[in-house]
Image (cartoon, rainbow, N blue to C red):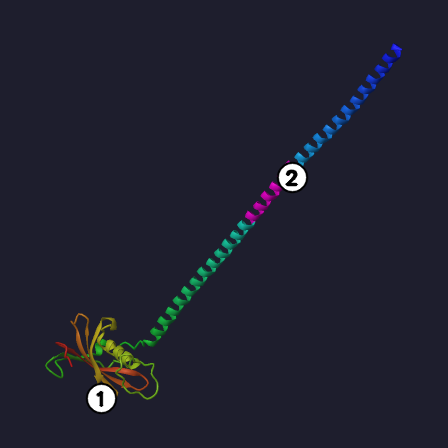
Amino acid sequence: MNRNYDSSSRESRSELRGKRRKTNLVLNMLIGLVILLIIFVSVKIFFGGNDENAAEKEQKIESKQDEKDIDTEENKNSAIDENKDEKQTESETENTDESEENSADTKADDEIDPIPANEEEAVVTEGGSNGNVKKTIENPSWNPIGTTQTGEHYAVYDKESVDWAEMLQAISYATGVDQSNMNVWFLGNNGFNKSVGTITTKDQKQIYRVYIDWVDGQGWKPTKVEELNEVEKK
């Protein structure tokens, strides 16, 4: 009987050990699965987060690149606009210079160049019409200075008129005094289409009274120049 009990007891312990082994094996497998699951989730979170960070970084880089491209394009457009403005300014400057040149040419055309007189033909007489006249000069080679005016002529003593400008040109032609060095003391009527003017150089060392007549279609012509001792103020 004792033998049977011992044998039964050994079998029970053997079965118990077998069950414990199976239980431990199952537990170990479950623990292994849990560990693997934890590792999988951790890897997923870690690398997934890195992918998101990488995507975010890439997006930021692309955004910055786009901004840089926009800035570059804006700078390029700005440079093009500035270049256009410079070219336009240069063109406007050239046009202004051209306009000024054309204006100067027109002005030069308007200023008639009279035929030079032969000074050797001049007749110089001491004294003149009154005691203030130092000497009188008459020259048959004086010519009409030419004119831009057309039609019937009446002397005009408006300082802004073409007639006034041409009368001063005739006076300059007869005396040799450049208009830029001329003071006009008097310029007025001396009969129908006849004028007389008193001028000096700016330093007043040369004083002249000049008589001019209008020649139809040809302009004002000097007829007599009187060199004066002093200015006759009227």
The correct choice, above or below, for 98 with respect to 117 in the image is above
Q: Which residue is mark 2?
A: 48
Residue 146: x and y in percent read: 31, 80
Q: Are marks 1 and 2 in contact (CB under 8 Å)?
A: no
Q: Is residue 12 left or right of residue 56?
A: right
Amino acid on which disc 2 is placed = Gly
What is the secondary structure assignment of the residue under circle 2? helix
Q: Is residue 71 visible?
A: yes
Label disc, if present, on residue 191 of the rendered structure: 1
Circle 1 packing at 10 Å, graded few (<14), some (14-19), many (20+), is few
Q: Amino acid at mark 1?
A: Gly
Please name whichever residue, 161 or 177, is drawn nearer the observer in this view of the structure: 161
Which of these two is toward me, 206 or 85?
A: 85
Residue that protrudes farthest toward the front in the picture: 1
Q: What are the residue bounds of the magenta stretch?
A: 46-65
Give the camera-side residue of 23 and 31. 23
Residue 58 lies within the magenta run: yes
